[in-house]
Image (cartoon, helix red, strand yellow):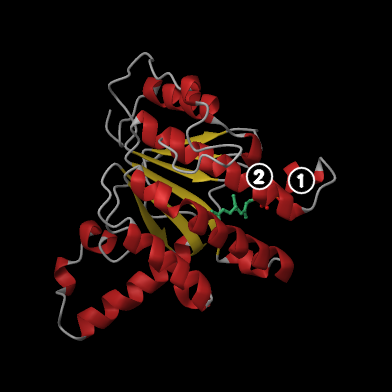
Amino acid sequence: MRSIRKKRKKSLNSNDSAVNISGPDSGRFPAHVAIIMDGNGRWAKSRSLERLEGHRRGVEALETIIRTSVNIGISYLTVFAFSTENWNRPEYEVTGIMMLLKEFLRSRQEELRDNGIRFNVVGNPGMLSEDVLDALDEAKLLTKDCRKMVLTIALSYGGRDEITRAVKQLALDAVAGRIDVDGIDEQIISGYLDTRDLPDPDMLIRTSGEVRISNFLLWQLAYTEIFITDTLWPDFGPDELVSLIKEYQSRDRRFGKV
Ligand code: FPP
């Protein structure tokens, strides 16, 4: 990924040599990789640092993974940045994560655009502040014509909340006669979700060893291959991403068939 900010210690272009995809089946490549970035707090605690420092390092890890993803040809990268449940965290942590998000967008949105990355958001905007909404809109507008990769940030996102909002809208459209109830099928339901423009993920990666989906993309993960790694998110890097993709390539995806 080409960096336009030469001054930063760590440009979005470092570490590219670490990426070498050639595996047993290098033709079968995941188009859409989704990630639950977990373990920032434990990473910080194990170093006697503030939790927010873990999130800060989490953003750096994310920047590296975005760069690697676009370079190796992933078309869709979706990351879980903040859940509907995360609103219950202490106020200083919530404010800190929102600040990191704004800083990420402010400092990186032009780089995203210059590297062909379209910025996208899923989640419930209801609880987001005006300045966060403005920053999200600005990044979406700036990158709207980008075609190499779609980066989706799940923010104030919960799978059940997404499905609830979709069902409400579907019911309103049915009552108003805009939709025929007999015609409702999986494709129509998918079209009401925040992810309507994205294919379902091929891979889900969760860091920090927790074996849970945690309300992430509940509908969309129906046939997704799941990978759990013990690595804490700030320590997750290109080598491990590539190694998990190789493992994906060796799996037999049958989608319920024999
Ligand atoms: C999970 O770690 C991580 C989060 C709840 C937030 C993820 C946020 C980032 C990676 C930074 C934000 C990035 C952007 C672009 C906004 P945890 O705090 O649950 O870790 P723990 O389980 O070890 O406590």
Disc 2 on helix, strand or loop? helix
* The one of 220 and 75 positioned closer to us in this rendering: 75
| Lateral position of residue 245 relative to residue 87, left or right | left
Residue 215 visible here = no
Residue 57: mark in rendering: 2
Q: Is mark 1 within 8 Å of ligand 1?
A: yes
Q: Give the x, y percent position of residue 256.
A: 31, 36
Q: Earlier in the sequence, mark 1 or mark 2?
A: 1
Residue at the image position 46 percent from the left and 72 percent from the top: 133
| Lateral position of residue 240 relative to residue 188, left or right | right
Amino acid tagged 2: Arg
**Residue situated furthest bottom in the rendering:** 176
* The one of 12 and 235 positioned closer to us in this rendering: 12
| Lateral position of residue 243 relative to residue 188, left or right | right
**Residue situated furthest front in the rendering:** 7
Label 1 sits on residue:
44
Amino acid tagged 1: Ala
